[in-house]
Amino acid sequence: MAESKDVQIMRPLRTVFIAAVVLTLGSLATGAEKDKKTQEKVKDQEAVHTVTASMDYPTNGGIGIQAEKRPGEFTIPKGAKGTKLKYQFSNPKTGSTLTRINGRNVYSVTEHRYMNELDGNPDYELPPGEYRFVVGGEPGAIGSLTYTLAQGSANDTPSAIRDKMSGAGIPRNGKISLVLSVPDVPNITFHWDFDIKEGAVVGRGECTGVPTDHIQNYHAEYRLQGTLTGRRITGTASEKITWESKGGFTKTRYDGQGEVELILHNDHTVVGSENHSGTTNGEPSVKGQRRGWVGTWQMSQKRAAKP
């Protein structure tokens, strides 16, 4: 029987439709297979991993550089997360040991920053990315970081998780006061005042206390210029410090500068980090020192002096 014209017209359309369905199902199957392979890869890697870091005698450096970091590198693959973090640190010269991890121990190579979210949050889970595990102390000090890979989300990134934790953004115009400290130097408290205009940040800081009892007439001034994005302030901080030794007339001047990141959380706590270098009496004395910052913040009416 001869086919009607309608049947002849519908045949190629039907063929195209079937081909489209096959391609669509094929794409879905391919995507599902990829997800399955990713899950299988993560499952295969669901084991305890350990990375080590240490302090060694410096290969080169200037005045005051007494030790050099030897970090350990590790990777959290896409679709996974690093859980059950356990930290061990030992400094044979002082006999000190530590088991509490902080944000200065893990550096995100992916985001070029320290993972300050670890401060006071040992249950924090590391999202996918490249990392370095670092420790401080004297030559001979060594630390280990143990973690377990677990199934995560492909959409998890350090910045995405940080934004969820931080809450709504800080107003792009206003004034903020911060009280900060460096856990490694408990004798000093830093007081910062920031002016924010259209997201541009200008800050001035002072400190109370002295780092050691062996000096006198200690005076420090701090300046910052940076940018506010959401609840994150990044920029360049500088410091000028002068002091005298007790029982003598030796005067010392320190000039330093560093790249700073501060995260202002919704509960008015602050965590941050700085990559710092400086000179003592004009000679290089600190190079690439990592500092951690913790503290509190509040909106303020006090204006910061111009740097």
Image (tube, rainbow, N blue to C red):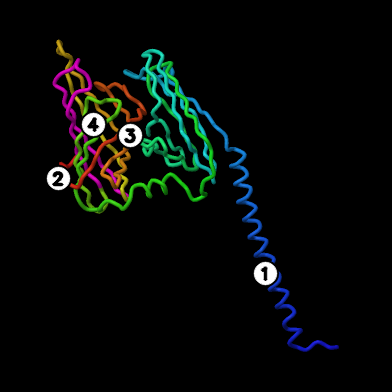
Looking at the image, which residue is at 70% across and 73% down? Answer: 16
Residue 250 on the magenta span: no
**Circle number at residue 54:** none
Instruction: State which mark lies toward you, 1 or 3.
Output: 1
Kind of element beneath mark 3 = strand
Q: Earlier in the sequence, mark 1 or mark 4?
A: 1
Type of amino acid under label 4: Glu
Q: Earlier in the sequence, mark 1 or mark 3?
A: 1
Can you identify the residue that label 3 sits on?
274
Q: Earlier in the sequence, mark 3 or mark 2?
A: 3
Instruction: State which mark lies toward you, 2 or 4.
Output: 2
Q: Residues within 10 Å of mark 4 (few under 14, many from 20)?
A: some
Start-end of magenta stretch = 201-229
Can you identify the residue that label 1 sits on?
20
Is 111 situated above or below 214? below
Is 250 situated above or below 156? above
